[in-house]
Image: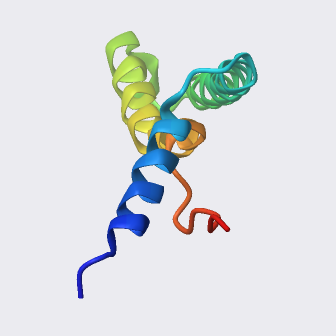
Amino acid sequence: MSKSRKQRKLAARSAAEARRLTPGKVLRLLLKTLAFALLVSLLVTLLASLGIPVFENFWMQLAVMLIVYLLAYPYLMSEFRPRRNPPTER
């Protein structure tokens, strides 16, 4: 069954609200990204200091960081996705 016009309108409004940049969302995104970057760089540094050959090459470290960031991207950007079940309007 297709959604009613009211449900589609509510979903579009919810998506527009989720995409809106607010200082709070930007700050949370910045803090989550900073914490994530610090954690991943500490992990890569620790693995390199343990002598794992893959992590001793700068370009491999960069590639691993990029792959891990791409995997974490949905979590980091969750602030800007609409909720699955938007609140109903009365």
22 left or right, relative to 80: right
Foreground pick, 19 / 45: 19
Most extreme residue toward the bottom is: 1
Please state the horizontal and vertical placement of residue 11, each as a whole percent of the image: 43, 57
> Looking at the image, is 88 positioned above or below residue 61?
below
> Looking at the image, is 89 positioned above or below residue 73?
below
Please state the horizontal and vertical placement of residue 50, each as a whole percent of the image: 62, 30
The residue that appears at 39% across and 36% down in the rendered structure is 70
Foreground pick, 8 / 64: 8
65 left or right, relative to 18: left
> Looking at the image, is 78 positioned above or below residue 40?
below
Foreground pick, 80 / 57: 80
Q: Residue 27 falls in which quadrant of the image?
A: top right
The residue that appears at 34% across and 24% down in the rendered structure is 63
The residue that appears at 65% across and 19% down in the rendered structure is 26
Q: Residue 2 falls in which quadrant of the image?
A: bottom left
Most extreme residue toward the top is: 58
Looking at the rendered image, the quarter that the N terminus falls into is: bottom left
